[in-house]
Amino acid sequence: MSALLGGWLFYFFPFFTDSIYGAWIFPSIRLFFNTLSFVSPLPLIYFFILWCVALLGSYIKNKSFFMHSSVSKNILKVGSDLLYFILFIVATFYWAWGMNYFRTSEAARFQLEVGAIEQYRLKEWILSWTEKVNNSRFLLHFDDDDEIRNYLTQIDLNSDLEKSFYELKNFHDLTSFRHIPVMLWRPKGLWLRNSTAGFYFPFTGEATLDSGLHPYQIPFTTAHEMAHAVGFTDEGICNLLALLVCMSAEDEFIKYSGKLALWRYLAREVRRLDPEFYTTIFEEKLSDKVKNDLRAIHRNSQKYPDWFPGLQRRVYDTYLRAHGVREGIASYNEVLMLAESYFYLFRERENDVD
């Protein structure tokens, strides 16, 4: 009931969502999870799973409905208990994170405009970013995936991204968090086989990634899920923040991950609009090392084919639209329009970042 009343208030009065939930309630919950994560020897999600299993075991052990003579009463009892549990989970989700959907538009908070980018600008942009991706890759001295994976284990990825996030949020006068817990999910490929590279788990406050991701995708995806962890809901905005955070990181590997991610979004759009121009860019402008990286990412993704092709996209698209994201899953691709607007406003009108 509290979640329903809170949701009603926050939906119709976004000001209260910003001033009460966004400024006080969510930061307090974030701090609580950060503290638990700091003292816990294991990712919190494992304790959540253990709690669910223990709860189910206790329910089966202690309930006497299995001994009732009436099957209909047993079914009714199980159904009502299950309904109460689902309502509890839903209410917890909204208080722990979901109320962020009712806050003032995230694009509006950054004063960004989302508008179509003209084709000639996309072509200019991909030419510029192809050069930047090439230069960034030149600074990395890796020849195979094993070297990349070894390097990834040596750097303090989370700390570097957290520092960049902290500086970015201070720049925009947003609520800052020093610690954002992240975990790599195992076994590999469990979420990738459901078209999911990572997700934010609101019941433990952790940004969670599939450990089967190619190493070059991990920094950008980690930063994206961190953006969710600090209260951003829009997928395009989270992509934009991931790009900015990676680009401002100290490590060249992390910077390259962000540049490569944006280049792939650009390439997808350019290929759709002008396949011949895209082919020219890929074959003649892109360095061999970057081409090899893109092929390695593709080969890695082929290891984890979808168990239910298209299902996750349809379900998540419906979920996003139900929570006010009109573009649904297509909002991921809005990173180009958001980046165009952001660079114009905050990077001296340059559609670029060094």
Image: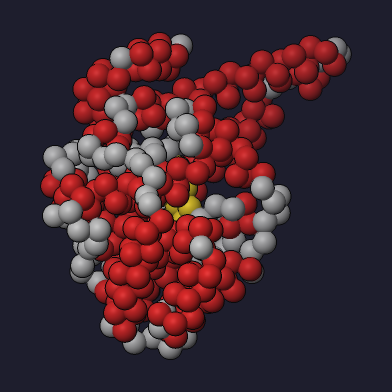
- Count the labels in the image: 0
Q: Is residue 21 visible?
A: no
x 37%, y 50%: residue: 117
Residue 44 vertical placement versus 183 (above, below) = above
x 71%, y 15%: residue: 77
| Render colour scheme | secondary structure
Quarter of the rendering containing residue 116: top left
Q: Is residue 61 visible?
A: yes
Report the front residue among 131 and 261.
131
Query: Left or right: 52 with respect to 129?
Result: right
Report the front residue among 306 and 28.
306
Query: Left or right: 286 with respect to 351?
Result: right
Q: Position of residue 182 (x, y in %)?
A: 38, 54
Q: Position of residue 38 (x, y in %)?
A: 29, 50
Q: Position of residue 241 (x, y in %)?
A: 30, 50
Query: Left or right: 24 with respect to 282?
Result: left
x 21%, y 50%: residue: 344
Quarter of the rendering containing residue 143: bottom left
The quadrant the C terminus occupies is: bottom left
Q: Position of residue 183 (x, y in %)?
A: 42, 56
Report the front residue among 96 and 332.
332
Report the front residue among 207 and 16.
16
x 31%, y 14%: residue: 13
